[in-house]
Image (cartoon, rainbow, N blue to C red):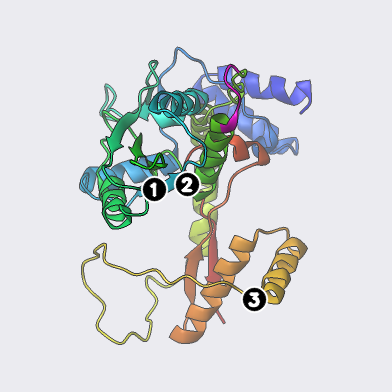
Amino acid sequence: MSLEMTALSRRFAALPAARQRVFLEKLRASGVGFETLPIVPRDPAAPVPMAYAQRALWLVWQRAPQSPAYNLSGRLALPLPCTPQQVQACLAQLVARHEVLCTTYPAGTEGQPLQHIDPAHRFGWAVREWAGSRADSERELAAAATEFGARPFDLEHGPVFRGELNLFADGASELFLAVHHIAADGQSVALLVAELQALLAAPAGSAQPAAPALQYADYAVWQRQWLEAGELERQTAYWREQLRDAPQSTPLPLDRPRQKARDARGRQISFALPPDVSQRLKELARKHAASPYMVAIALLGLLVYAAAASATCASVRHRPRATALSWLPWWATSPTCWCCA
């Protein structure tokens, strides 16, 4: 990224809100999109607002703080002999690298939630010892993992990330991990696990990897400044026009009446695509500069359209730029795929 573009980003960030709007208009008139400018570090002394995606989850949590619907959890077998101190130290390094893992969301002076990054980088941690072997304890272990993943998170006080190490009589060990969706998504959880495995496998005394140059809080500030300088109004007007005739709901041919109130009951069905179908899907995605996920969502929309015999909508999540691949937040920028005749 050129120094000139970085300088423009820094100039914009330093302006008061009223002048940021004028700056954005002049930038757009010159043919330069603000979204092409690099994200720059925030002012560390200034309050950190929530990103719009985070605020949506925070509002959902306010309505149902005990719900585990937005908990992400999993189990990680540790193939190498690790002491509780080693595992805890590696998790502490992860949290220090990714501040969103130790961020809470208390209400600010005007009642609006803010991001508070814990300077002590605290996270939930526990060690549990089992009397039996790993194999003999599988049924109880599975139940313990389910209970661990379902424990509610407190977004205002934290922590939003926790781990529990299970030690067995035969020397085996397994790590439970859980994080609230406000701090991670499926892609970033995969990054988290990969980094943790690398830390656990590193020789004792190895140099710690450097923290990313930017944190999710930097993105949140950049996004707020950009959208509140007029971009939010422009995008809102665009989507209102695009979705002016979109249906409020999709009348699916269900085998029972649709419930009036939503609940958390559901079911997952997993299946693998044949290799040739998977390859064609990837080729189609590359042809249209899209991800396989976006193509799959578009196909799902077409399937629902065919079943309902009417227009339908589906949302597609994506990360705003390549640099975000090294961050651990929840990304929920949601352009809409509208399937209609």
Residue 339 visible from this viewpoint: no
Q: Main secondary structure of the magenta part?
A: loop
In magenta, the rendered stretch is: 201-205
In the rendered view, tell whether residue 85 sits above or below residue 54: above
Between marks 1 and 2, how big is the CA–CA gap?
8 Å
Question: Residue visible at 45% across and 25% down?
Answer: 86
Could you tell me how far apart the alpha carbons at marks 3 and 1 are, in whole angstroms? 28 Å
Q: Amino acid at mark 1?
A: Leu
Q: Is residue 204 magenta?
A: yes
Q: Residues within 10 Å of mark 2 (few under 14, many from 20)?
A: many
Q: How busy is the neighbourhood of tag 1: few (under 14 within 10 Å), some, or many (20 plus)?
A: many
The amino acid type of the residue labelled 2 equals Asp
What x and y, as percent, mark residue 128?
28, 36
Depth check, mark 2 against mark 3: the one in front is 3
Quadrant holding the N terminus:
top right
Task: Determine whether, in the image, residue 151 is placed left or right of residue 209.
Answer: left
Where disc 3 sits, the SS reads loop
The quadrant of the picture occupied by the C terminus is bottom right
Residue 312 covered by magenta stretch? no
Kind of element beneath mark 2: loop
- Residue 58's image quarter? top left
Position of residue 40 relative to residue 67, above or below, is above
Instruction: Say which of 91 and 212 sits in front.
Output: 91
Q: Which mark is residue 72?
A: 1
Q: Is residue 160 visible?
A: yes
Which label belongs to residue 185? Answer: 2
Contact, mark 1 vs mark 2 (Cβ under 8 Å): yes
Please tell me whether mark 3 or mark 1 is closer to you in this view. 3
User: What's the residue at 59%, 20% (across, down)?
Assistant: 208
Instruction: Please give the residue where the numbered disc 3 appears in the rendered image.
Output: 274
**Label 3 crowd (10 A; few <14 / some 14-19 / many >=20):** few
| Mark 2 or 3, nearer chain start | 2
